[in-house]
């Protein structure tokens, strides 16, 4: 009987350990997903790129 | 004028073409660690008699520099010793490196460069380089400038791709509220609209733009630098590169957002340029080199924003050489930086 109770106690410890490891693993997985996804903002809804001509660029250097 | 170019990769080769098309350069010496690997590229330049290929040897480097007008550094790896030897020989130095450690080594030559009256341009590529010029031009439009945010897309060549891979995992020093703040690499996701592209998610990377821009504009409150990256890029940045980078690099773009005040009102200036990243970097490198050789840059060590007194004039020259400079107009801006 004492060996039976020792065996069930060891099994209980193993179950606790595996559950703890599973919890840590799941937390890490969620953290990785959240970090890799995230939110990057919204695109501009109006406006656009305009090429600057040589005359657009040079006057800025005048004092 | 004789130019000495170290490295003939994707950026170096395009820089060589730009130099050869310049009236100022009559003679180009290309130095390579393994000349056999770049013989075909030298032949493709099609300027026999003008271009000479030699092996890069520390023992004979001083002889090659004798009488040279400028030294261009476009090879990966440490080049601080080469730059120091050039400055001691009173030869201006222009480097395309985007490695913060390399840039710091070049900036350390400030005192000697000033004493000799030569320029040491640290970061004359797409970013830093074109990014610094765009920022300097936008700063001149404002009465007061507070923030500069740089974002890039694409890489110039294999060395740039390897550097970007490392920059996505290295700790990032960002200028924030007037002090350096260490940030986690690949953090701070932002959706950035580049010229010629749809939006791309960009993340903090370890690049020297904040170092160079705060040196040029000490009153800045915040400077950040980001690069477009996919989830796979970020996830695998901790691992060795899973596949070799493209030998000619990728199509790229740079976007610079400058915030400040004009006539008492908040103002945002957004500038950008797009094209093959190696071509943008090579054109900036060659154009800056010709200016350094002809004494049209300030003496000392720094980025283009520090050493160029007329950024618009240099941007106009780049524009004439095929680099389209664009401004984003008419849209709202995202204040999420």
Image (cartoon, coloured by chain):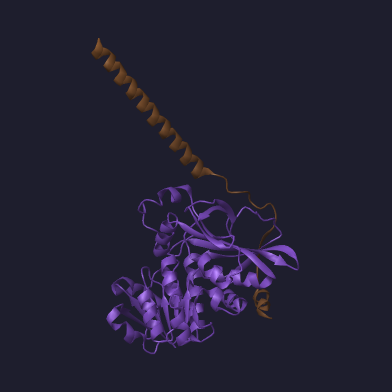
For this rendering, which residue is in front, B166 or B313? B166
Is the N terminus of chain A in the top left, top right, bottom left or bottom right quadrant? top left
A33 up-or-down from B4: above or below = above
Look at the image and tell me whether residue A5 can be seen: yes
Q: Position of residue B46 (x, y in %)?
A: 40, 79
For this rendering, which residue is in front, B174 or B273? B174
Q: Where is residue B160 in the image (x, y as percent from the top left)?
A: 42, 63
Q: The purple chain is which one?
A: B
Q: Where is residue B288 in the image (x, y as percent from the top left)?
A: 51, 78
Residue visible at 41% across and 58% down in the picture? B166
Q: Where is residue B221 in the image (x, y as percent from the top left)?
A: 61, 63
Outermost residue, bottom side: B67
Q: Which chain is brown?
A: A
Q: Is residue B130 shown left or right of residue B4? A: right
Q: Is residue B314 shown left or right of residue B241? A: right
Look at the image and tell me whether residue B152 can be seen: no
Outermost residue, front side: A2
Is the C terminus of chain A in the top left, top right, bottom left or bottom right quadrant? bottom right
Query: Image quarter for residue B326?
Result: bottom right
Residue visible at 32% across and 87% down in the picture? B63
A13 up-or-down from B90: above or below = above
For this rendering, which residue is in front, B131 or B302? B302
Q: How many numbered discs, if any? A: 0
Residue visible at 70% across and 65% down in the picture? B261
Outermost residue, top side: A1
A45 up-or-down from A20: above or below = below
Query: Image quarter for residue A61?
Result: bottom right
B269 up-or-down from A19: above or below = below
């Amino acid at each position: 009987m004492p060996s039976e109770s020792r065996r069930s106690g060891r099994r209980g410890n193993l179950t606790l350990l595996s559950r703890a490891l599973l919890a840590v693993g799941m937390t890490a997985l969620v953290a990785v997903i959240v970090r890799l996804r995230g939110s990057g903002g919204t695109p501009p809804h109006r406006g656009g790129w305009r090429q600057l001509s040589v005359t657009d660029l040079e006057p800025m250097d005048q004092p | 004028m004789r130019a000495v170019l170290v490295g003939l990769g994707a950026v170096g080769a395009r820089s060589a073409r730009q130099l050869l098309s310049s009236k100022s350069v009559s003679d180009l010496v290309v130095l390579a660690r393994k000349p056999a690997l770049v013989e075909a590229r030298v032949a493709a330049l099609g300027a026999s008699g003008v271009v000479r290929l030699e092996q890069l040897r520390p023992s004979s480097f001083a002889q090659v520099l004798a009488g040279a007008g400028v030294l261009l550094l476009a090879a990966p790896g440490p080049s601080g010793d080469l730059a120091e030897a050039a400055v001691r020989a009173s030869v201006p130095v222009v480097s395309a490196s985007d490695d913060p450690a390399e840039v710091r080594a070049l900036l350390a030559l400030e005192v000697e460069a000033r004493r000799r009256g030569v320029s040491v341009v640290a970061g004359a590529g797409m970013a830093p380089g074109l990014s610094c010029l765009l920022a300097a031009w936008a700063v001149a439009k404002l009465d007061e400038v507070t923030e500069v945010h740089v974002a890039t897309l694409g890489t110039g060549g294999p060395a740039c791709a390897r550097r970007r891979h490392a920059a996505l995992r290295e700790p990032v020093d960002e200028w924030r509220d007037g002090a350096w703040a260490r940030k986690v690499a690949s953090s701070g996701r932002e959706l950035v609209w580049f010229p010629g592209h749809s939006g791309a998610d960009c993340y903090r990377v370890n690049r020297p733009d904040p170092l160079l821009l705060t040196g040029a504009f000490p009153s800045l409150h915040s400077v950040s630098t980001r690069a477009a990256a996919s989830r796979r890029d970020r996830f695998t940045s901790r691992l060795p590169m899973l596949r070799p980078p493209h030998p000619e690099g990728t199509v790229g773009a740079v976007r610079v957002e400058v915030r400040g005040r004009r006539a008492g009102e908040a103002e945002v200036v957004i500038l950008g340029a797009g094209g093959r990243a190696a071509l943008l970097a090579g054109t900036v490198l060659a154009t800056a080199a010709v200016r350094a050789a002809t004494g049209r840059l300030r003496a000392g060590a720094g980025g283009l924003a520090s050493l160029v007194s007329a950024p618009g004039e240099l941007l106009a020259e780049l524009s004439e050489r095929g680099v389209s400079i664009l401004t984003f107009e008419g849209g709202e801006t995202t204040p999420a930086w």
